[in-house]
Image (cartoon, grey):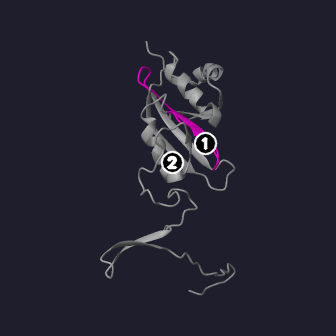
């Protein structure tokens, strides 16, 4: 009989995997792990006979601007043997790199390149960490919340040069005062 992971198993899991906290949300199990224990934790969860999370289905990033650890990186892993899904979350700041998981899960390569390209989260020991969704000359990371909505450059067709050119955008914003104590008669 196949055993499903329950909250009781999380007590035994804590003896094997060093996680900070766990919770269950919408019948999904979520572990919070320190960034320096991430690769160890995922390797144990993949290889341990009682868990066997052998499939990495997704890695995603979230920008939590204004917090000490600005970025949350979430890993979705699946145990086909026990028919269980687990989400591992880790938090890093702008300068702290994460260890690449490509030695553990080969499909982490593409996900880590996307997160690097869109958020600027660096992955140590990644063999091919380069832009994948934006142009090679692209400046900045477009999914960061402090990235300007218009970007830094504008592409347009020049009739004079008869080709597409890129111009730098000058970002200006007027200073305006808003009064909250104004009353309007309707």
Query: Do we see residue 168 in this rendering?
Result: yes
Q: Can you say which quadrant of the picture contains the C terminus?
A: bottom right
Magenta segment boundaries in residue numbering: 79-101
Q: Can you say which quadrant of the picture contains the N terminus?
A: top left
Q: Nearer the viewer, residue 64 or 182?
A: 64
Upstream in the sequence, badge 1 or badge 2?
1
**Residue 5 in the figure: left or right of residue 83:** right
Residue 157 location (% of width, % of height) = 33, 75
Task: Tell me how far mark 1 sits from mark 2, CA to CA.
Answer: 10 Å
Residue 136 location (% of width, % of height) = 44, 56
Q: Is residue 131 shown above or below 26?
A: below
* Rendered image quadrant of residue 57: top left
**Residue 142 in the figure: left or right of residue 176:** left
Q: Is residue 112 shown above or below 94?
A: above
Let me know if residue 5 is in the magenta part. no
What residue appears at the point 44 percent right and 15 percent down from the top-left corner? 2
* Rendered image quadrant of residue 56: top left
Residue 116's disc number? 2
What residue appears at the point 61 percent right and 85 percent down from the top-left corner? 184
**Residue 65 in the figure: left or right of residue 148:** right
- Residue extending farthest to the front is 161
What residue appears at the point 64 percent right and 81 percent down from the top-left corner? 175
Residue 154 location (% of width, % of height) = 43, 71
Badge 1: residue crowd in 10 Å (few <14, some 14–19, many ≥20) = some
What residue appears at the point 43 percent right and 31 percent down from the top-left corner? 106
Q: Is residue 180 shown above or below 94?
A: below
Residue 65 location (% of width, % of height) = 62, 55
Q: Secondary structure at mark 1?
A: loop
């Amino acid at each position: 009989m196949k055993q499903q992971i329950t909250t009781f198993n999380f007590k035994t899991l804590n003896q094997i995997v060093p996680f900070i906290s766990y919770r269950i949300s919408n019948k999904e199990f979520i572990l919070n792990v320190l960034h320096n224990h991430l690769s160890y934790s995922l390797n144990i969860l993949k290889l341990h006979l009682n868990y066997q999370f052998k499939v990495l289905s997704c890695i995603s990033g979230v920008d939590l601007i204004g917090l000490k650890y600005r970025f949350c990186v979430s890993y979705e892993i699946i145990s086909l043997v026990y028919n269980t899904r687990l989400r591992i979350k880790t938090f890093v700041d702008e300068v702290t790199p994460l260890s690449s998981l490509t030695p553990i899960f080969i499909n982490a390569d593409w996900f880590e390149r996307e997160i690097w390209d869109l958020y600027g989260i660096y992955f140590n020991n990644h063999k091919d960490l380069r832009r994948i969704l934006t142009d090679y000359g692209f400046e900045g990371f477009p999914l960061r919340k402090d990235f300007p909505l218009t970007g830094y450059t504008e592409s347009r067709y020049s009739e004079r040069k008869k080709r597409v050119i890129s111009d730098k955008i000058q970002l200006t914003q007027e200073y305006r005062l808003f009064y909250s104590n104004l009353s309007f008669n309707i």
